Image (cartoon, grey):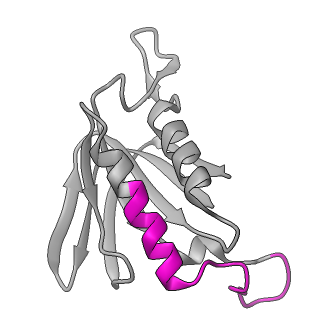
Amino acid sequence: MKLLLQRVSRASVSVADEQVGAIGRGILALVGFERADGEEQVTRLTERMLNYRLFADEAGKTNLSVRDVAGGVLLVSQFTLAADTRRGLRPGFSLAADPQRANDLYLTMLELLRREAGVELASGIFGADMQVMLVNDGPVTFLLEG
């Protein structure tokens, strides 16, 4: 499982020119699932995302999580994160989870995030052709793997 976190001042996702999700200050989280992934990885990386220190405290140190700042999470599925890019000029997807399994894991992650008090949640649409707009604050971007 790969989870790309981007600290944003705002972000949105649209499908067919219709906005389906948006947040203000928070995290744009792009997630890709691999064959070996299960609910254990989803639970662990969701918890890490919510506690990961991406935001500055009063001293300017990156010591605060999205929970600490009562920020938002925009979760977007991104199949291409599961690509094998180690060789050649074309990505391979043999390690990617099949679409049904990936969708199940995506829905599990959304449910875990919905239960999180104090965090605004928005999402894309699994498998859709999405347009994502963001203002990357910093820029600050981290890749979590699990």
Is 72 left, or right, of 88 in this rendering? left
- Residue stretch rendered in magenta on the structure: 86-109
What residue is shown at x 37% (from left), y 64% (from top)?
Answer: 107
Looking at the picture, does residue 106 appear above or below residue 49? below
From this viewpoint, which residue is outermost toward the right? 87
**57 drawn magenta:** no
Looking at the picture, does residue 43 appear above or below residue 68? below
What residue is shown at x 72% (from left), y 87% (from top)?
Answer: 92
Q: Quadrant of residue 120?
A: top left
* Any part of residue 141 in sight: no
Q: Position of residue 76 (x, y in %)?
A: 39, 65
Q: Position of residue 121 (x, y in %)?
A: 26, 49
Front residue of this view, candidates 95 and 83: 95
What residue is shown at x 76% (from left), y 77% (from top)?
Answer: 85
**88 drawn magenta:** yes
Q: Position of residue 129 (x, y in %)?
A: 34, 85
User: Which quadrant: the N terminus?
Assistant: bottom right
* Any part of residue 58 in sight: yes
Is 21 left, or right, of 67 in this rendering? left
Looking at the picture, does residue 45 appear above or below residue 116? below
